[in-house]
């Protein structure tokens, strides 16, 4: 860092060299479906931030009424993942009823996240709400 560019106090994010100038996160609405059956009432909201080819994200899914939904929960991501042959795993929690750990998996070259309980069983239950966050490489 040149003497003339010295910064005192907190270093501004733009000076870190991370490829981001402190831009805001962007909202998106994921489409939420299940492996089998259908939800009667489900909602999803999300936000993301892209730095280079890295996508940071947060998703909230709320199952108001499960209906006949079963198996994994599928949520659309804001971008297709890179075709690296490596999937992305993310962790989160059910936050409304029981607090189970949940995990999300994004396959290589996919724009879908597959969400299950920590032991790969279904989390399609009336009243459950999930918060999931993570990072993945985009195409």
Image (cartoon, rainbow, N blue to C red):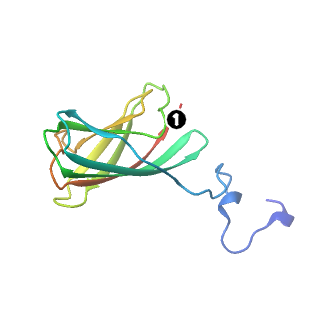
Drawn side of residue 67 relative to residue 49, left or right: left
120 relative to 60, above or below:
above
**Is residue 129 shown above or below 110?**
below
Q: Residue furthest right?
A: 4
Image quarter (top left, top right, bottom left or bottom right) of the C terminus: top right
Residue 33, percent from left and from top: 27, 38
Q: Residue at x 29, y 44 (%)?
A: 103
Left or right, 57 with respect to 41, comes to: right
Of residues 133 and 41, the one drawn nearer to the viewer in this rendering: 41
Tell me the element at label 1: loop
In the rendering, at what x and y percent does residue 121 appear? 16, 40
Q: Which residue is mark 1?
A: 138
In this view, the residue farthest toward the left is: 68
Q: How many marks?
A: 1
Name the residue rendered at 38%, 30% in the picture. Answer: 107
Task: Where is residue 124? Give x, y as percent.
Answer: 18, 44
Horizontally, residue 124 falls left or right of residue 109, namely left
Please name whichever residue, 84 or 75, is drawn nearer the observer in this view of the structure: 75
Residue 2 position, x and y percent, is 83, 60
Q: Mark 1 packing: few (<14 Cα in 10 Å), some, or many (20+)? A: many
The extreme bottom residue here reads 9
Q: Nearer the viewer, residue 36 or 131?
A: 36
Image point (68%, 65%), residue name: 12
Screen quadrant of the N terminus:
bottom right
- The structure residue drawn at horizontal position 20% and vertical position 42%, both measured from the top left corner, is 39
């Amino acid at each position: 860092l040149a003497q003339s560019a010295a910064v005192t106090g907190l270093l501004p994010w733009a000076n870190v060299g991370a490829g981001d100038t402190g831009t805001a996160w962007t909202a998106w609405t994921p489409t939420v479906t299940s492996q089998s059956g259908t939800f009667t009432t489900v909602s999803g909201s999300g936000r993301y931030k892209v730095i280079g080819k890295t996508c940071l994200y947060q998703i909230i899914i709320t199952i108001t009424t499960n209906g006949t939904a079963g198996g994994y929960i599928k949520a659309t991501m804001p971008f297709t993942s890179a075709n690296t042959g490596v999937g992305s795993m993310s962790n989160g929690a059910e936050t409304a009823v029981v607090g189970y750990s949940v995990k999300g998996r994004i396959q290589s070259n996919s724009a879908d996240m597959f969400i299950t309980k920590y032991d790969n069983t279904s989390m399609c239950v009336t009243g459950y709400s999930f918060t999931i966050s993570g990072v993945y490489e985009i195409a």
